[in-house]
Amino acid sequence: MTPFVTWKAFYSVGNAAIDDQHKRILDIINDLHSAIEDGDEMDTLNSLLGRMVDYTNTHFQFEENLMKECGYPHLEEHRQLHNELRRKTAGLRSHAEIVTGSDLLSFLKTWWIDHIQEMDQQYSPYLTASVSS
Ligand SMILES: [Fe+2]
Ligand SMILES: [Fe+2]
């Protein structure tokens, strides 16, 4: 089966740890997609959403620390966007029974792909400059 979301080389932010974390997030979205397609139990969906919440928090924390370390000037603005998704993802999880699969998936796919391509790309030059100096 074709994956619902696929990693592309141009999503790279030039940092292997972050790229790996982004790939894992896309994997969780694909797992959610398969679970919904297969008509899996609510329990499975809930545990996948739990993984999504946990992994999102871990990733955002990691990314915010790196942005701080490399002196990224728009850290606060970026953190606000993360906070918005932290809240939304936690909300999706606590209302899992009323969110429909396709709403959930299109929301997650759009948010993550846009964020990785637009916002995360913006700190990339600062990160790579600080590593090579
Ligand atoms: Fe990210
Ligand atoms: Fe980010």
Image: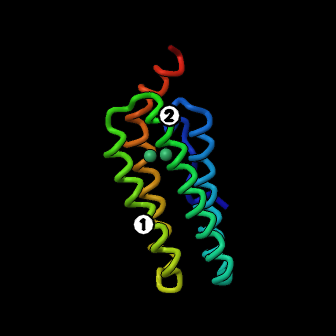
The residue drawn where x is 48% and y is 74% is 92
- Kind of residue at badge 1: Arg
Q: Are marks 2 and 1 in contact (CB under 8 Å)?
A: no
Quote the CA–CA distance across marks 2 and 1.
25 Å
**Residue 113 location, x and y as percent?**
45, 51
Residue corresponding to mark 1: 87
**Residue 122 location, x and y as percent?**
37, 35
The residue drawn where x is 52% and y is 80% is 96
Q: Vertically, is 20 above or below 31?
A: above
Label drawn at residue 13: 2
Residue 16 falls left or right of residue 78: right
Give SS at disc 1.
Answer: helix
Disc 2: CA contacts within 10 A as few (<14), some (14-19) or many (>=20): many
**Residue 116 location, x and y as percent?**
45, 45
The residue drawn where x is 62% and y is 76% is 45
Q: Vertically, is 6 above or below 105?
A: above
**Residue 129 location, x and y as percent?**
46, 20
- Kind of residue at badge 2: Val
The residue drawn where x is 47% and y is 85% is 98
Q: Earlier in the sequence, mark 2 or mark 1?
A: 2
Q: Quadrant of residue 119?
A: top left
Give SS at disc 2.
Answer: loop
Residue 44 falls left or right of residue 71: right
